[in-house]
Every structure is written in structure tokens, then in C-alpha cells.
Image: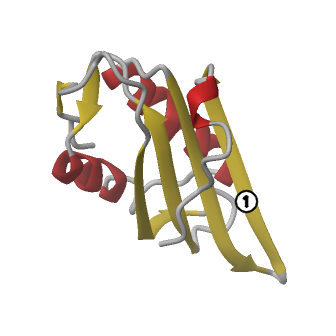
Amino acid sequence: MADLETFPNPCPERAFLIESVTHEFTCNCPMTGQPDFATIRLRYVPGPRCVELKSLKLYLWGFRDEGHFHEDVTNRILDTLAGACEPVWMEVRGEFNVRGGIATTITARCGDRPASLDGVERSEF
């Protein structure tokens, strides 16, 4: 699994929202071994550090050959990212494609969302 790289928050005095998304996430079902496809949405208010995007991409690619339940992989991504950059608030949302007629969305969060972001909705991209 690739290491996550971070860089110093360029505006630590301000609460601002970073949103990143990939529509190309894959891992394998631990029960069947079949691939699961998902959109992963990351939203966070950085603390002292921000996540470098190329390393994020490589980190997420590292799940391609691993078996994980949707609930596990979403929470594992949150734990790893939060540990790397110590955000004020972070949300990871895994929107998994239909499997057996059922689509699954897992949302995991940590920290306290700043009140200054009330009314700020999720970007659609």
C-alpha cells in the first residue's frame, strides 16, 4: 500500500473545505472475490496538514487487489487519512455500485464540523 504524503496547511488560521473525489475506486468482495466498484468522496477541513493528491490516488489504488467489506474499507480510509493529516473535521463517503440489485453508501466522519460551514453543501462532481 502506498504511503500518504501531506504538506503544511497554507492557511491554518481559516476553516476551509477541501473536497476530492474518485469514480475509479475498486476493491474485492471478501466473500466472493469479485470486484466492487465505488465512488469515494473525501471532504475535510484541514488541521496542520493537507493530503497530497497524487499520493491519495496511489493509496486508493492499493485496495484494488485486497478483499474488504464496504463498511471496513470506508472506515479504514477515514482512519488512515485522519491519522496522516489530523483534520479538524473529515468525511469519507463510499458510494458502491449495485451488486445483487442493492447499491450501498457508507459515510464515516471524525471531528467537529465548523459552524462556518453550515449551509455548505457537497459538491457534485
Q: From this viewpoint, is residue 16 visible?
A: yes
Query: Element type at marker 1?
Result: strand
51 lies above or below 46: below
112 lies above or below 57: above
Res 83 → quadrant: top left
Q: Pick whichever, 119 or 28, lies toward us.
A: 119
Q: Quadrant of the N terminus?
A: top left
94 lies above or below 14: below
45 lies above or below 94: above
Q: Pick whichever, 37 or 5, lies toward us.
A: 5
Query: What residue type is disc 1 on?
Result: Thr
For this view, does 11 lie left or right of residue 88? Answer: left
Report the number of numbered marks: 1
Q: Read off the residue under disc 1.
A: 105
Question: Residue 43 at what x, y percent from top left?
Answer: 49, 44
Q: Pick whichever, 15 or 110, lies toward us.
A: 15
For this view, does 64 lie left or right of residue 124? Answer: left
Question: Residue 124 at what x, y percent from top left?
Answer: 54, 70
Q: How is the image coloured?
A: secondary structure
Residue sitting at 32 percent across and 59 percent down? 61
Q: From this viewpoint, is residue 113 visible?
A: no
Residue sitting at 28 percent across and 16 percent down? 48
